[in-house]
Image (cartoon, rainbow, N blue to C red):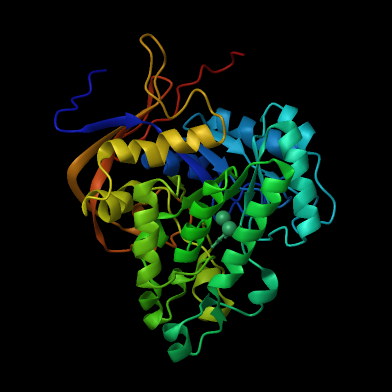
Amino acid sequence: EVIDAAGQILLPGFVDLHTHLREPGREDTETIDSGSAAAALGGYTAVFAMANTSPVADSVVVTDHVWRRGQEVGLVDVHPVGAVTVGLEGKQLAEMATMAAGTGRVRMFSDDGHCVYDPLLMRRALEYSSSLGVLIAQHAEEPRLTVGAVAHEGPTAARLGLAGWPRAAEESIVARDALLARDAGARVHICHASTAGTVELVKWARGQGISITAEVTPHHLLLDDSRLETYDAVNKVNPPLREASDVAALRAGLAEGVIDCVATDHAPHAEQDKCCEFAAARPGMLGLETALSIVAMTMVRPGLLDWRGVARVMSERPAEIVGLDDQGRPIDVGEPANLVLIDPDAEWTVHAPALASVASNTPYESMTLPARVTTTILRGRVTARNGDVRTPVRCSGGQ
Ligand code: DOR
Ligand code: ZN
Ligand code: ZN
């Protein structure tokens, strides 16, 4: 097949360190199948599927299932993220070694949505991860500061009568875990940085020689809490949309390399969990199919990153952080390639029903976005082209 790439940008396939695929447990909102299609359309060749499924991905049975199912679908490598504890708010560390040694080869552990708020447990988790050579990803929020909170604590939430969620809930955990990682000689990864203070803390910790990395979501690069005016629960997310000054600091932090990479936190939710009162709605928004366009809008168009920089934050750094050696880098001659082709001049309008995700909770509905993924290639095979996914042809009866 000949692909005409005139005027297009060729980058290594994107790697998403933070995706919620909802399988097993909530297949009514996303499956490994539908999420893989969304990922391929978004330019991704590897995604990391978060552990807060049902059952929780706290055993090799679940993590191997996720990996195998992803390989069967064949559109993107679905790397399982293991839970740090047995059960999401468990008090006992999960068997990370067994998950790391499984077919799914778990390289990153998290407790998404239910942070390890016990500092002693986190310390032990970091020591354990360091001995195994795997990574702990912290979702960074102090639960005792967020009881009942639904939106960023600030003038907007106060005016709208929404219970506020302070920056310190995130920043205190970032600071704490940086120090715990230092003492344990471990690496720690900060998920979805959302405040200016987090950028400063990551910079400070790195200056101290601490092995800390951080990601930012596309929505925290674009949206701020002025979005809450409508009380539309599509804007409810964890961590919450912050203030314009935080958005500016996150963009600058990503441009400078203080924030290592972009990760979507793709969080599909059912209609009934989003079309209720703001306080009762579930937090989270779709992200896989719109990520590149939001990065183009917030970073490339304003001159904060060039396309080389996009390769760094969407492919190379995320691959390095989890030690994927077959992703996120230039290809040697003869090697099967993971690639994405982008039309930088294209514009498209987001319509939720046209997205591959089962859920439709995109905050960008009806917005016209710049830049579009035209082709995604996984190990030399086209997985998405001009808005259509191409599932691998399988021989019937064989193997
Ligand atoms: O908004 C969010 N939703 N943030 C998370 O980290 C978890 C996610 C979910 O699972 O829905
Ligand atoms: Zn989270
Ligand atoms: Zn998440």
Quarter of the picture holding the N terminus: top left
Tell me what residue is drawn at x 81 percent, y 39 percent. Answer: 95
204 versus 194 height, above or below: above
| Residue 170: x %, y % from top left | 58, 65
- Counting from the top left corner in percent of width and height, residue 278 is at 51, 79
The answer to which quarter of the image holds residue 253 is: bottom left
Q: What is the quadrant of residue 383 in the picture? A: top left
Ligand 2 is located in which of the four quadrants?
Answer: bottom right
Q: Is residue 20 visible?
A: no
Question: Does any portion of residue 91 appear in the rendered image?
Answer: yes
**Residue at (78%, 33%) from the top-left corner?**
97
Residue at position x 74%, y 32% in the image: 132
Q: Is residue 86 left or right of residue 165?
A: right
Position of residue 287 measured from the top left corner of the image (x, y, whole percent): 43, 53
Q: The C terminus lies in which quarter of the figure?
A: top right
145 or 294: nearer the eye? 145
Kindly identify the residue that appears in the image at 35 percent across and 10 percent down: 333
Is 144 positioned to the left or the right of 6 in the image? right
